[in-house]
Image: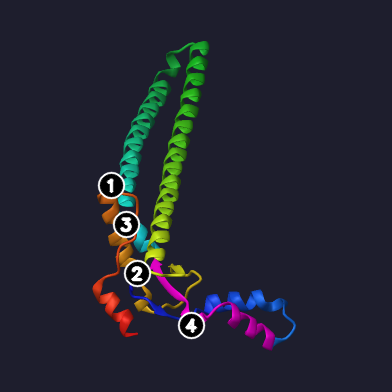
Amino acid sequence: MRKITTIISAIVMAGMLAVSCNSTTPGEEISNIADEVNIADLKVAYIVTDSVINNFTYFKEKSAEIAEKGKKYEGELTNRARGFEQEVQNFQSSASSMTINQARAKEEELVTKERNLVAFRENIMQELSADETKLYNDVYDMIQEYLDTYAAENDLEMILSYTRGGGVWYANKTLDITDSVVEGINEDYQNGEEPEATEPAASESTESEQE
C-alpha cells in the first residue's frame, strides 16, 4: 500500500448525511448509512493538483512550446506595429504635398492597415488562448486516466484534489501521493506509454502496514 491510511473524511461524511435526509428518524438515518458503507474502511488519498500539473513533463514541454510561439507572434506584431507607425509618420510629413484625393486614399489605406493590425493581434491572442485551454484539457485527461489505474492498483476508493482555497482545508500528509503520481506519470510519458499507475514506494508501504 501507498501512504494510505483509513480516515473518516468530513466531506464524505457530510455528503452521506445529506443523502440520508429523506429518512424520518435520526436513528434510522445513522443505521442505514452504517449498513451501506463501512466508513472506517474508506481508503482515501490526495494529490496537490497544481504540483502534479506543473511537474508533469508533458505540461512543461507543451507550455514552453506555447510560450515560444507567443514570443514569435509578439515579435511579428511588434514589427508590424513599428512599420505602421513609420508609415503614419511618413504620411503626416508628406501630406501637405499631396492632392486631396491622394491624401484621402492614403488615409483609407492606413485605416485598413490599422484594422488589420488589430485583427492580427486579436487572432493571435485567441489562438494562444485556445492552445492553452487545449493543453490543460489534455493534461487533465491524462492525469485522470493515470489516477483511474493508480486507484485500482492501490485499492483506493477516492483520490482527492487538494488546492489552496479549495474544498479540502486539511489533509494528513501520510495521505499525500503527489510525488509518487508525478514520478509515475512522467516515467510513463518518457517511455512513450499511456499513463499507468506505479507501485507504492517501499517506505510508504511499510508506513501503511504499521498503521
Q: Residue at x 33, y 31 (%)?
A: 79
Task: Write down the residue under mark 1.
Answer: 192
Q: Which of marks 1 and 3 is nearer the N terminus?
A: 3
Q: Which residue is drawn at 29% across and 53% down?
A: 188
Q: Between 174 and 87, which is closer to the camera in this rendering? A: 174
Residue 148: percent from left, percent from top: 43, 60
Cα gap from disc 2 to disc 4, whole angstroms: 20 Å
Q: Between 102 and 162, which is closer to the camera in this rendering? A: 162
Of the 4 image quadrants, the one containing the C terminus is bottom left
Q: In the rendered view, does 15 fall on the left or right side of 175?
A: right
Q: Between 203 and 124, which is closer to the camera in this rendering? A: 203
Task: Write down the residue under mark 3.
Answer: 185
Task: Write down the residue under mark 4.
Answer: 40
Of the 4 image quadrants, the one containing the N terminus is bottom left
Residue 116: percent from left, percent from top: 47, 27
Cα gap from disc 1 to disc 3, whole angstroms: 11 Å
| Residue numbers of the magenta segment | 27-48
